[in-house]
């Protein structure tokens, strides 16, 4: 899916273990940075993505 401005996580490792995100009309897009353009893309609503990011920031994942 080209044409999107993909942003790499600021917490990515040197080994490339991270995700990339981009915005689309009414959606947040997420993909695996290691696979780049070959990566499957997860498309979620901005609200869902915001809750996901908030959960990460508040360490609600085990």
Image (cartoon, rainbow, N blue to C red):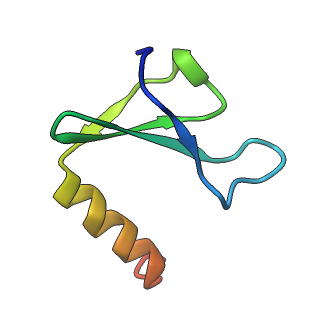
x 46%, y 78%: residue: 57
Of 2 and 30, the residue lying toward us = 2
Residue 61, image quadrant? bottom left
Q: Position of residue 40 (x, y in %)?
A: 42, 24
x 36%, y 75%: residue: 55
Of 23 and 31, the residue lying toward us = 23
x 40%, y 15%: residue: 1
Q: Where is residue 37 in the image (x, y as percent from the top left)?
A: 54, 17
Q: Position of residue 6 (x, y in %)?
A: 51, 34
Q: Residue furthest bottom?
A: 58
Task: Tell me: 35 left or right of 55.
Answer: right
Q: Position of residue 16 (x, y in %)?
A: 74, 41
x 38%, y 67%: residue: 53
Task: Tell me: 16 left or right of 47.
Answer: right
- Number of numbered discs: 0
Q: Relative to 16, is 51 above or below?
A: below
């Amino acid at each position: 899916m080209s044409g999107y401005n993909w942003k790499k996580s600021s917490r990515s490792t040197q080994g490339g273990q991270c995700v990339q995100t981009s915005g689309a009309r009414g959606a947040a897009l997420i993909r695996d940075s290691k696979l780049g353009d070959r990566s499957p893309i997860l498309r979620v609503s901005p609200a869902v993505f915001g809750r996901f990011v908030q959960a990460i920031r508040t360490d609600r994942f085990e």
